[in-house]
Amino acid sequence: MGRTSERDVARNRRKAHIRKKVRGDAERPRLCVFRSTNHVYAQIIDDVRGHTLVAASTLSPELKEHTGHGGNVTAAREVGLLVAKLAIGAGVTAVCFDRNGYLYHGCVKALADGAREGGLNF
């Protein structure tokens, strides 16, 4: 088993602090972002029911062919556009943004901008 790095411990601490305030419900589900070095993932979650309503990532079939490397800002923006399209198709127009302990810049900011551009309000 690998050890948890200090960077991951600090992110998990920030994540817990953020999640005290950010909750998703039926009217405004939570848009949660996860990023790794190679891919970016986004989920829209209803925390009351405990269900994932919509999910998209750089591994999604719609994006996998033309994104190339999935860990960059361009791919994150495409994931934001895709998650917005799927969410509007599922009847979700407003979300609360959960950056999951990551700093709001780079891939996280690009995903949020793509989701806003796709029609989500937050």
Image (cartoon, helix red, strand yellow):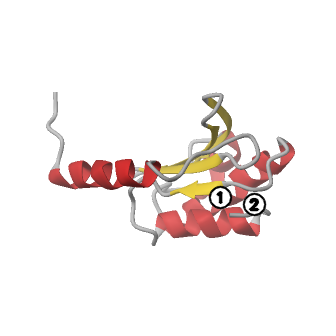
Q: What is the crowding at mark 2: few (fewer than 14 residues within 10 Å), some, or many (at least 20)?
A: many
Q: Which residue is mark 1?
A: 80
Residue at 60% of width from left, 29% of height from top? 50
- Position of the N terminus, as image quadrant, is top left
Decide which of 95, 58 is in the foreground and name it.
95
Could you tell me the amino acid type at mark 2? Leu
Q: Nearer the viewer, residue 50 or 52?
A: 50
Q: CA distance from mark 2 to mark 1?
A: 9 Å
Answer few, some or many: residues within 10 Å of disc 1's Cα (few below 14, many 20 plus, some between 14 and 19): many
- Give SS at disc 2: loop
- Which residue sits at x=37%, y=53%? 17
Q: Residue 6: x percent and y percent? A: 16, 52
Amino acid carrying label 1: it is Gly
Q: Residue 37, how many percent across, how many down?
A: 37, 53
Q: Position of residue 63 (x, y in %)?
A: 65, 50
Q: Quadrant of the C terminus?
A: bottom right
Name which residue lies at 45% across and 72% down: 105
In the picture, measured across the screen, residue 30 lies left or right of residue 83, that is left
The picture quadrant where one finds residue 43 is top right
Give the residue pinned by disc 2: 120
Looking at this rendering, what residue extends furthest in the front direction? 21
- Identify the mark at residue 119; answer none if there is no mark: none
- Expressed as whole percent of the image width and height from the top left, the position of residue 104 reads 46, 69
Q: Is residue 81 left or right of residue 69?
A: right
Q: In this picture, is 43 found above or below 2?
A: below
Q: How many marks?
A: 2
Residue drawn at 71 percent across, 67 percent down:
116
